[in-house]
Image (tube, coloured by chain):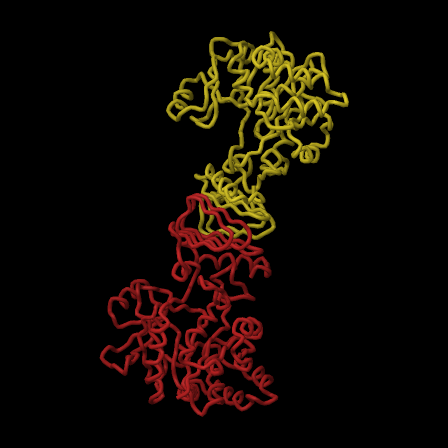
Chain colours: A red, B yellow
Amino acid sequence: MKITALIMAGGRGERFWPRSRKNLPKQFLSLTDDGKTLIQLTVERILPLVDMEDIYISTNQDYRPLVSEQLPDIPPENILCEPVGRNTAPCVGLGAIYAAKKYEDALMIVLPSDHMVKYNRMFVSTLKDACDIAAKDDNLVTIGIAPDYPETGYGYIKFNPDSIKGRGYEVAHFAEKPSLELAKDYVSSDEYLWNSGMFIWKASSILKRFETLMPDTYEGLITIKDAIRTDEETSVLEKVFPSFSSISIDYGIMEKSKNIYTVPGTFGWDDVGSWIAVERTKKTNEFGNIVDGNVITINTADCIIQGQKKLIATVGVNDLVIVDTDDATLICDKSCTADIKKVLENLKVCNRNEYL
Amino acid sequence: MKITALIMAGGRGERFWPRSRKNLPKQFLSLTDDGKTLIQLTVERILPLVDMEDIYISTNQDYRPLVSEQLPDIPPENILCEPVGRNTAPCVGLGAIYAAKKYEDALMIVLPSDHMVKYNRMFVSTLKDACDIAAKDDNLVTIGIAPDYPETGYGYIKFNPDSIKGRGYEVAHFAEKPSLELAKDYVSSDEYLWNSGMFIWKASSILKRFETLMPDTYEGLITIKDAIRTDEETSVLEKVFPSFSSISIDYGIMEKSKNIYTVPGTFGWDDVGSWIAVERTKKTNEFGNIVDGNVITINTADCIIQGQKKLIATVGVNDLVIVDTDDATLICDKSCTADIKKVLENLKVCNRNEYL
């Protein structure tokens, strides 16, 4: 069965400020030494499984030029621009009808555009395993990540270790972001995986779920599907899409469906959640520093320094994230990267949109 | 007796890098909230005692435009440009012959251009006391500062507490920068003062000392004196001055002379030796930060942040000195400001003169 992919690239994350901006979100940044952007790496990673012309990028009108520029080999008609953001369920639905319009039926791999994977061949192998399960019986498959530590910022997948299905397991239920205590229980139980937000199913399987669980959205999706490759394609999309409920695919479909399976992945997954992640994606020097750009470090250790042309000189500092851009410089303790959003809140309150 | 002043402004200090540069040394920077530069404040401070036309600025050709710009009321002929740097003894000698050329005899106040004084009226009062002593018997007077703590970066003055002279004391000897142990002894003995580098004497008194202790320099100075206000003034200066030995006034004259007195000053003296000094010259906010320019601070305490137009955002940091300029940004732990010179060494080694 033909395999298609939907890469979700509409996010406007703020955690990589000041490098990431409203007009240049994280998925379009390079955070690795090879200079490739996260979305470029995401596409590259699935090419062993999916033909370029079967990769769809869902984004919005603002980011279309960035997608075209960074992914020139993606056919322009595969760049799906949501007229408004409506969370992941409508986004997945839109991808599904494009795949279903092109092929009588097709497998569909749904991926975030801003995650990292260390072991690409294991990743592809895991996706193949997931495809095997998804190809049968309208199963929905999600990739689960074996947790390294009790992270409280991710959702978890409880699986049933006795219900083996190919290389996967039946999902018992999805668990929301837990307290630290609960997260520790999850990790020690060996029956929970991190919910990575990567899904595999047939376009027809997921559309059936929309039909039952989100019938209004389903109806709208079919209206859009009928307009694909007609003169009304854009106008129908712009009329219908905003009427969809803003809801995540997890909450709208996955948590309410049967026949959900998870394939555990051990391919060095990283959601690149903050500047700290750069320590995992780039090489550190002998002092534990990660240094880019025009930088001089004196007695400086364990810092992430992202300079550009301007000289950055550090003296006697440790554990800092320093990010320089043309109009803004961030100096942040590594333990406080979650508070970068407070800078953005401050900027919003003061209406200083040029920095957002 | 007429009082003249010589303000020494030829220094090329590196401690305020990246704000201070070879072409903009510390004395020409503003480090106070009033926006006035250190040399402007130095001149302003002595105006109750000295007429503007009797203030001489010794500097070099590179800084003449800065002096003229920042001190437009100083007569241009009072800006004395040393053809080469030869430390403070030749500098003081040059000032002395200009004063001696203008007046049959005159008192001469010698001041660094890059120090701060908190209590200006007490400063003037101390200088007056020093002038009273210097006006008699060819006495040489140095201003001593009652030490707050055992600083190892200053020279000390040992005075004889029983030999009171007006408001001053006879100097027993000068002591070089001490070890910490020795500095502690000095401070606890109550017979030592910091050597501030501020001197008061008659032009004739100091020239007599040159005649005896530095006769070659004296001879050259007289040659220059004869050329003042002639067509040969510049050419003679450029020919003679480079032949002078490079030696400090302390080492060349003060330590070898008799009739040396010190007047203790308690006027809030500060040699503004590093960025840390800004904590004493500018107001801190409620979080202990000193913030200038376009800055957002989140969970930031006890930092010195000197921004400009570019946005600087700090998150979760303490005790940092952050200085932004057009082409370079410094991020330095407060405890490591002495290592800023290592950045400059690195730049010199790499021949990156544009940053020096």
In which quarter of the view is residue B253 placed?
top right
As drawn, A120 above or below A78: above
**What x and y, as percent, mark residue B258?**
53, 9
Viewport quadrant of the C terminus of chain B: top right
Determine the image quadrant of residue B9.
top right
Query: Which of A145 and B60 lies nearest the eye of the viewer?
Result: B60
Extreme-top residue of the structure? B137
Specify whether residue B319 is in view. no
A153 vs A17, left or right, is left
Give the residue at the far left of this rendering. Answer: A162
Say whether residue B179 is left or right of residue B228: left
Task: Please name the residue shown 57% across and 59% down the image.
Answer: A355
Which residue is situated farthest in the right direction here? B231
Q: Up-down: is B333 above or below B273? A: below
Q: Inspect this view and state whether residue A356 appears.
A: yes
Q: Which x, y percent locates residue A73? A: 52, 77
- Asked whether B111 or B343 is in front, the reply is B343
Q: Above or below — where is B277 with respect to A162?
A: above
From the viewer's perspective, tell me whether residue B331 is left or right of residue B293.
left
Q: Position of residue B106 (x, y in %)?
A: 68, 14
Residue located at (68% from left, 34% from top): B70
